[in-house]
Image (spheres, coloured by chain):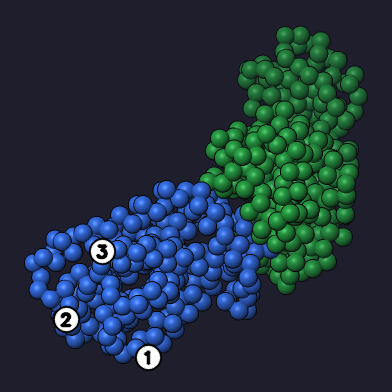
């Protein structure tokens, strides 16, 4: 059990803390650019496209799309952090090899990276939530729990990203990952329009991606209405997060300890 | 025994990196691994600090199996890797404190040790500088300071002075000898035979994944080469003339250099008399001569 989640000790938090320290040292480069995309979406979908669209599922378009913008902000940040960011630390900067030469294990490096990617998603989602509150799109108190839901969503995507990172030989392979999975997930999971527009087979495919459930639950909190099927969705997002995390830390162990 | 390796083997897919190596490292000594690039030195070291897993054979460090107890082993050793893997986004001091956190050192202990080690490595005045703003020699010293944060019993150094200027090399040598005096065991790889000769009590010569010979530098020199070397630097044509005239002496050719070996300096009198214009040095045999003999061209008679 030396290479799975059962082998992990709290030492993974030192990896998280190392990344947090670098994040704070480069704060101004990290916060504003990361917020540019969600802010642009709010502007484009709220004022631009939104003004041509009648109510969608009974609410103004900006209120419908808010959950999608917030969710995208979380998963995109986690994905960038744990693809290009982790790969850079792993293969170019030699950071991971330095860390595993200490008592910290390769599995703890994997989990620390995932936890850090989730944290960045959480920070981004929280900032977007503040903006949405400020412009008066949100009306219900339970939205304050959404950043925590988005922490799990970001954790899920960070785990998949670390799994991919631990498998590829050069950064260019991330282009396949972004074009083949991340961009479709960002647009096809009920983010910007209801997936009921799709043929049934495509809808099933969309539900298979946990992001659809994260968006659905977040939207149900924002609009104060029931989720499509809260219990199965919650089970699926938690189970898939756990499975991908286990696969990612195992794969990272195999990558780092040869 | 600090390290014990028996029939140690490492294969990466179909490439054999280390083949059937045995060695023992005694506490408080400096043990050197020398050999050409690709000989398997770094892989051997990485097995000792548990980031490469042996394919077969036994390897214990501090009496513990590297496969069973990597965390316990790594807690007691320090590593200076071949490439400086410092955090470029952090300051000199933050690099040390972050490293200390991986060992779970309490904050006040880490602060005290980082101050001490920065002074030890002559870096105190650069504590707040960022890594890209300090020189290559300072970065190497910082990596050495970092490896000492956990007060290790065994220090592993992979080519500690490659590419450094003579002042920094001497500073690092002084520090390593001082650490050895304090009882820290050193395991070192190097391409510089003067470095191995200066620092190491025992040297393992590796070539093509195998151990070629082992012993103290003096033993290895006595065993493999005569005590005196006459080194001639000349052009290709004169070199072949000289070889024709003095071919009866034990010698070796390396590019435009000719090396004559002998038991007494008097053996070279004829060479000296015949070739006043050639650039020549008469010197005692060194570990480099052993290295070239064992891993390079054989001495021809």
- Same subunit, labels 3 and 2: the answer reads yes
Q: Which residue is mark 3?
A: A135
Under tag 1, what secondary structure? helix
Give residue B134's mark.
none
The residue shown at (25%, 67%) is: A136
Q: Colour of chain B?
A: green
Secondary structure at badge 3 equals loop
- Which of discs 3 and 1 lies nearer the camera? The answer is 3
Q: Of the numbered discs in the image, which one, if any, rests on residue A231?
A: 1
Per the image, the residue denoted by label 2 is: A57
Image coordinates of residue B190 in percent, x first then y, are 71, 42
Q: Chain of mark 1?
A: A
Residue A105: image quadrant is bottom right
In the picture provided, is A216 more to the left or to the right than B278? left
Per the model, the C-alpha gap separating discs 2 and 1 is 22 Å
Q: Nearer the viewer, residue B42 or A106?
A: A106
Q: Secondary structure at mark 2?
A: loop
Q: According to the rendering, which colour does chain A have?
A: blue
Point out the image quarter for the C terminus of chain A: bottom right
Instruction: Give how far across and how far down residue B78 sits, in percent.
Output: 73, 53
Marks counted in the figure total 3
- Residue A212 visible within the image: no
Judged left or right of residue B163, residue B108 is right
| Residue lying at 41% horizontally and 48% vertically, measured from the top left | A29
Residue in the picture at 57% in, 57% down: A18
Separation (CA) of disc 3 from disc 1: 32 Å
Up-down relation of residue A2 to residue B10 (above or below) = below
Q: Residue A170: give x, y in percent of width and height.
A: 42, 55
């Amino acid at each position: 059990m030396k290479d799975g989640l059962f082998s992990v000790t709290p030492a993974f938090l030192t990896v998280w803390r190392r990344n947090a320290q670098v994040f704070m040292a480069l704060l101004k480069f990290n916060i504003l650019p990361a917020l540019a995309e969600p802010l642009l979406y709010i502007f484009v979908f709220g004022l631009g496209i939104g003004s041509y669209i009648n109510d969608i599922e009974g609410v103004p378009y900006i209120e419908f799309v808010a959950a999608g913008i917030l969710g995208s902000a979380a998963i995109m940040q986690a994905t960038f952090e744990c693809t290009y960011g982790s790969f850079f630390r792993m293969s170019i900067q030699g950071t991971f090899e330095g860390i595993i030469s200490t008592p910290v294990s390769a599995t703890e490096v994997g989990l620390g990276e995932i936890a850090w990617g989730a944290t960045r998603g959480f920070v981004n989602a929280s900032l977007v939530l503040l903006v949405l509150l400020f412009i008066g799109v949100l009306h219900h108190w339970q939205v304050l729990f959404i950043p925590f839901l988005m922490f799990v969503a970001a954790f899920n995507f960070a785990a998949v990203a670390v799994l991919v990172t631990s498998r590829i030989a050069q950064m260019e392979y991330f282009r396949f990952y972004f074009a083949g999975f991340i961009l479709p997930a960002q647009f096809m999971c009920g983010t910007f329009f209801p997936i009921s527009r799709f043929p049934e087979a495509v809808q099933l495919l969309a539900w298979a991606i946990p992001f659809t459930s994260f968006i659905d639950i977040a939207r149900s909190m924002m609009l104060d209405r029931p989720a499509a099927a809260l219990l199965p969705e919650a089970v699926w997002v938690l189970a898939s997060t756990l499975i991908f995390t286990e696969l990612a830390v195992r794969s990272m162990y195999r990558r780092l300890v040869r | 025994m600090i390290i014990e390796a028996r029939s140690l083997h490492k294969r990466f897919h179909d490439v054999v990196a280390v083949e059937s190596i045995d060695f023992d490292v005694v506490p408080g000594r400096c043990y050197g691994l020398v050999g050409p690039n690709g000989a398997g030195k770094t892989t051997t070291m990485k097995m000792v600090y548990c980031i490469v897993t042996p394919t077969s054979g036994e390897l214990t460090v501090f009496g513990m199996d590297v496969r069973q107890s990597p965390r316990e082993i790594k807690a007691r050793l320090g590593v200076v890797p071949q490439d400086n893997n410092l955090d470029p986004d952090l300051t000199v001091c933050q690099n040390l404190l972050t490293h200390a956190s991986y060992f779970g050192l309490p904050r006040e202990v880490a602060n005290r040790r980082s101050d001490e080690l920065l002074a030890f490595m002559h870096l105190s005045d650069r504590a707040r500088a960022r890594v890209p703003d300090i020189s290559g020699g300072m970065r190497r010293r910082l990596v050495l300071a970092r490896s000492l944060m956990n007060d290790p019993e065994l220090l592993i150094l992979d080519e500690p002075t490659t590419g450094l200027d003579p002042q920094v090399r001497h500073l690092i040598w002084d520090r390593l000898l001082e650490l050895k005096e304090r009882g820290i065991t050193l395991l070192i790889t190097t391409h510089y035979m003067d470095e191995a000769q200066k620092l190491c009590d025992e040297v393992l010569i590796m070539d093509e994944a195998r151990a070629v010979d082992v012993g103290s530098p003096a033993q290895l020199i006595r065993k493999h080469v005569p005590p005196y070397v006459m080194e001639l630097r000349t052009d290709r044509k004169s070199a072949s003339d000289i070889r024709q005239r003095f071919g009866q002496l034990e010698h070796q050719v390396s590019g435009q250099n000719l090396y004559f070996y002998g038991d007494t300096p008097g053996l070279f009198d004829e060479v000296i008399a015949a070739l006043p214009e050639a650039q020549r040095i008469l010197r005692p045999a060194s570990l480099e001569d052993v290295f070239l003999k064992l891993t390079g061209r054989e001495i021809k008679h």
